[in-house]
Amino acid sequence: MREHTAQERWRAARWIQALLPATLLACGIAAADANRYAQLRAAMLDAIRADYQDTALYIDKEHADPRVLAAMGRVPRHEFVAENLQARAYENRPLPIGHGQTISQPYIVAVMTDLLGVDADDRVLEVGTGSGYQAAVLAELVAQVYSLEIIEPLATRAEERLSRLGYANVTIRHGDGYYGWEQHAPFDAIVVTAAASHVPPPLIAQLKPGGRMVIPVGTRFLVQELLMVVKDAEGKVSTRQLLPVRFVPLTGGH
Ligand code: SAH
């Protein structure tokens, strides 16, 4: 091997000198970003708590389940929106995710997750993967999440995103969620994140006795209501109206 000349060594040293501040700066920016997002997440949880106070009469609950808030405090919501919207990801409002769809408002994600009343060993079905955010929040709380998305590129992107973020207990499939996911049924809980005109009978069939489903029902132009559907131990189904909401429509062939 040839000896490096003094000039080459000097050039290499200059390169390191030039790159080092840039590297340190990049690390500094990453740390500052993480810190800023943590602050925004904390502010988002405050906004959710405030909305709970305002809607206590509807959902019969003044405080969110602390486990749900803790889960939402861990999920990096800015990773679920396009880069140009990341700074706004923690605002308490829905945001566009492409293909005419939206990531739900944080308060709505909290309420829907909370109302499902899930346990650590539950298996949950989600209809309407969208960005994958609701699935990630559920994945923090339960054993296994199955999520169906009718728009293929959204399903693919959500799958990549969740595996990059290390969510190993979410399975996503491209398909029409109206019919549920028979292969993995019955589910302890089902959450539908697009508004249906009625509660899909296949989803009721795939709910375990003792299970709960939270679903917005109504038309695209009129007010939709968030419904809680409960199947008791004997298989009897009852439905309760909770909260006026606004979701993108459930599409598909039914
Ligand atoms: N839960 C999502 C938000 C979903 S928006 C999130 O956390 O980001 C509603 C989603 O439901 C959209 O992505 C839409 O494409 C999807 N959708 C609509 N009809 C559907 C159907 N029949 N089956 C599965 N997904 C459907």
Image (cartoon, rainbow, N blue to C red):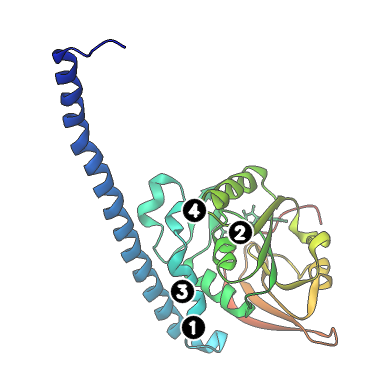
Q: Which of the two labelled residues, at mark 4 and mark 2, occupies the earlier sequence position?
A: 4
Percent x, y of residue 33: 30, 53
Query: Does the image show residue 149?
Result: no
- The three-letter amino acid code for the residue at tag 2 is Val
Residue hosting label 3: 70
Does 145 sit above or below residue 61? above
- Asked if the residue at tag 2 contacts the one at tag 1, i.e. Cβ–Cβ closer than 8 Å, the answer is no
Look at discs 3 and 2 and give the one toward the viewer. 3
Residue hosting label 1: 55
Does 68 sit above or below residue 103? below
Residue hosting label 2: 248
The structure residue drawn at horizontal position 47% and vertical position 75%, both measured from the top left corner, is 69
Measure the C-alpha gap from mark 3 to mark 2.
27 Å
Query: Does the image show residue 210?
Result: yes
Q: Is mark 2 within 8 Å of ligand 1?
A: yes
Q: Is mark 4 within 8 Å of ligand 1?
A: yes
Percent x, y of residue 17: 16, 31
Measure the C-alpha gap from mark 1 to mark 2.
22 Å
Q: Which of the two labelled residues, at mark 1 and mark 3, occupies the earlier sequence position?
A: 1
